[in-house]
């Protein structure tokens, strides 16, 4: 076989095959867009209260406790902080870490690890784990809304003003959740 | 000449060998003498001029403690409480034996009993750092686990000796003792949020203290107050005292509280000046947290003999406040709920003695439920969750 024949076979495909390049690129872009939309949709959907409720209603009592709390809307303005506002970080990587960790909940849901009958006996371990996570993040999810830099101390009670001495917090390694445990869900034993 | 030099050389070698042998034999003797009579550096860290452990100060505080003086500082009771298993907590020897072997000595007594002292709680020389004798989590009578760091040692004794679930059952009234309740120091149970008579259908919780005070008892009772009265041996440290008369006036230890409750003070009546979140005793006023607890006690027993435990039929207490001892009568039965109410009153008002401070949430919940069980008109709408 001559060299020129080899080249024509390898380097000169039929023109119809050349369409594969732009089509492939378009497909990749479309797939990428769809993947991004799906990803964001999943993240958004799994941040929604309805998603949390789909397991927690009937499994334990934390939804009922939350809905009766200040954060669940029992306040003069009816303002509601969602489950994810408190339990899911806003930053991308910490958020992904929480989502990945949360996949273990699927196992517990399938196995029926927690139910209304045994929930109270597990409350302390579960609440302590959430508290430890919040402490490790210096209560960042509280501070997303309760920005201490713009607090009006005159609106706080004397007791709150004393307890909200932030220099003291830092010196004593305290953070919001150190004191405000049980604000939304019942306190553990 | 050469012979002379050789002889001198041999002589020098022989003398050197002898001297070296002598030195080799003397070295261990000198070391042994040092070990026997010198003051090792490790001891000096505790007992020297600049001690790591303030042994003398600790001893002065211990001398003011309930461990040394007995309950309410009235009488050292190592001899009185020696036997029947009481020596496990009321004597040094009984405690050490119990921690080592698990034997509470219920079928024996200590021949020469002594008060709980330094080496009851500490192992002074095992590791040279005064380590505690017991650090393992403690299983309380009801089966709950107490695991709060160094306080595990305290709760070997400071726990109820009664499981209320088996004790508070329908019982003929003549079989019910005035002492019915947890004996004697249920502080570990209270701090743990367990051990009280809990009412069916109710959910119970603990104060944030339980999670924030990792060493429980130790974190508050051994905190040394700031300032001059920190020097008072009756407050904090090894006195374990939370309050004392200092220069003619009552002082309470605020040092541990201030870690979270910045600026906390003492009320004129000697309580912690920290407001309750609601009017739990329904007297129409939101008072400091301990006052609310005292109000709940008074709803059960009070000086006017109008408390629920004084006015029930038949009452636990007579009009003069004394125990209403009922003679054998098959028709009089104390129900489980009545005994639960008596148990809870004794637990919080008589034995725990912290006026709720050991676990405020649990104390309020249990006391409100207790009052409501005897007086259905008592609202528990503001019961803490």
Image (cartoon, rainbow, N blue to C red):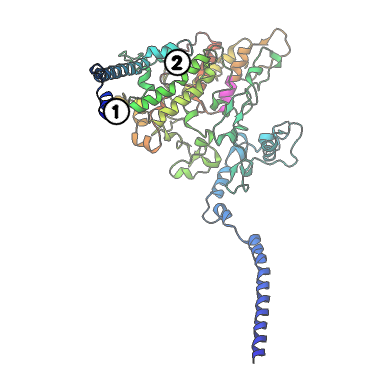
Residue B258 is a magenta residue: no
Closest to the observer: B158 or A109?
A109
B354 left or right, relative to A3? right
Rendered location of residue A68, percent (x, y): 40, 13
Quadrant the N terminus of chain B occupies = bottom right
Q: Where are the magenta residues, as a range?
A: B344-352
**Residue identified by numbered label 1:** A153
**Residue identified by numbered label 2:** A62
Q: Residue furthest front?
A: A1
Q: Residue at x 65, y 82 (%)?
A: B12
- Residue B116's place in the image compared with A14, above or below, is below
B381 left or right, relative to B20? left
Q: Is residue B290 visible?
A: no
Q: Residues within 10 Å of mark 1 (few under 14, many from 20)?
A: few
Rendered location of residue A49, percent (x, y): 37, 14
Residue B349 is a magenta residue: yes
Chain letter of the residue beneath label 2 in the structure image = A
**Earlier-in-chain disc, 1 versus 2:** 2
């Amino acid at each position: 076989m001559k060299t020129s024949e080899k080249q024509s076979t390898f380097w000169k495909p039929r023109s119809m095959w050349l369409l594969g390049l732009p089509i492939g690129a378009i497909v990749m872009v479309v797939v990428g867009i769809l993947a991004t939309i799906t990803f964001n949709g999943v993240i958004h959907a799994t941040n929604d209260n309805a998603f949390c409720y789909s397991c927690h209603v009937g499994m334990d009592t934390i939804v009922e406790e939350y809905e009766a709390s200040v954060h669940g809307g029992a306040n003069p303005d009816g303002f509601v902080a969602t489950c994810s506002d408190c339990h899911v970080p806003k930053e991308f990587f910490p958020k992904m870490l929480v989502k990945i960790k949360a996949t273990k909940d699927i196992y517990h849901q399938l196995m029926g690890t927690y139910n209304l009958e045994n929930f109270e006996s597990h409350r302390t371990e579960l609440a302590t784990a959430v508290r430890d996570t919040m402490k490790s993040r210096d209560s960042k999810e509280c501070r997303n809304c309760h920005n201490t830099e713009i607090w009006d101390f005159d609106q706080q009670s004397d007791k709150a003003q004393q307890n909200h001495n932030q220099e003291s917090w830092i010196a004593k390694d305290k953070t919001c959740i150190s004191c405000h445990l049980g604000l939304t869900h019942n306190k553990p034993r | 000449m050469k012979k002379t030099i050789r002889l001198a050389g041999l002589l020098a070698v022989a003398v050197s060998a002898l001297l070296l042998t002598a030195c080799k034999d003397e070295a261990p003797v000198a070391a042994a003498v040092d070990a026997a009579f010198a003051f090792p550096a490790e001891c000096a860290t505790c007992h020297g001029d600049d001690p790591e452990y303030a042994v003398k100060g600790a001893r002065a505080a211990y001398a003011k403690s309930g461990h040394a003086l007995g309950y309410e500082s009235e009488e050292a009771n190592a001899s009185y409480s020696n036997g029947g298993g009481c020596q496990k907590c009321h004597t040094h020897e009984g405690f050490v034996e119990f921690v080592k072997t698990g034997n509470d000595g219920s079928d024996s007594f200590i021949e020469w009993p002594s008060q709980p002292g330094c080496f009851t709680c500490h192992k002074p020389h095992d590791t040279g750092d005064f380590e505690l004798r017991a650090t393992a989590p403690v299983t309380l009578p009801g089966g709950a686990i107490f695991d709060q760091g160094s306080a595990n040692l305290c709760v070997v004794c400071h726990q109820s000796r009664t499981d209320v679930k088996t004790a508070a059952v329908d019982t003929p009234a003549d079989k019910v003792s005035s002492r019915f309740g947890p004996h004697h120091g249920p502080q570990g149970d209270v701090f743990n949020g367990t051990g009280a008579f809990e009412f069916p259908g109710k959910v119970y919780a603990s104060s944030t203290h339980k999670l924030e005070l990792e060493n429980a008892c130790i974190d508050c009772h051994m905190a040394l107050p700031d300032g001059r009265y920190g020097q008072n041996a009756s407050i904090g440290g090894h006195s374990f005292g939370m309050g004392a008369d200092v220069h003619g006036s009552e002082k309470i230890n605020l040092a541990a509280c201030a870690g979270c409750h910045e600026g906390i003070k003492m009320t004129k009546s000697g309580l912690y000046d920290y407001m309750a979140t609601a009017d739990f005793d329904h007297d129409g006023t939101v008072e400091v947290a301990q006052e609310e607890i005292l109000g709940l006690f008074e709803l059960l027993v009070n000086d006017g003999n109008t408390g629920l435990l004084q006015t029930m039929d038949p009452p636990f207490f007579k009009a003069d406040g004394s125990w209403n001892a009922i003679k054998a009568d098959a028709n009089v039965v104390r129900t489980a709920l009545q005994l639960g109410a008596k148990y809870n009153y004794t637990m919080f008002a008589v034995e725990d003695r912290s006026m709720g401070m050991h676990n405020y949430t649990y104390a309020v919940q249990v006391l409100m439920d207790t009052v409501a069980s005897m007086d259905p008109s008592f609202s528990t709408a503001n019961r803490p969750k």
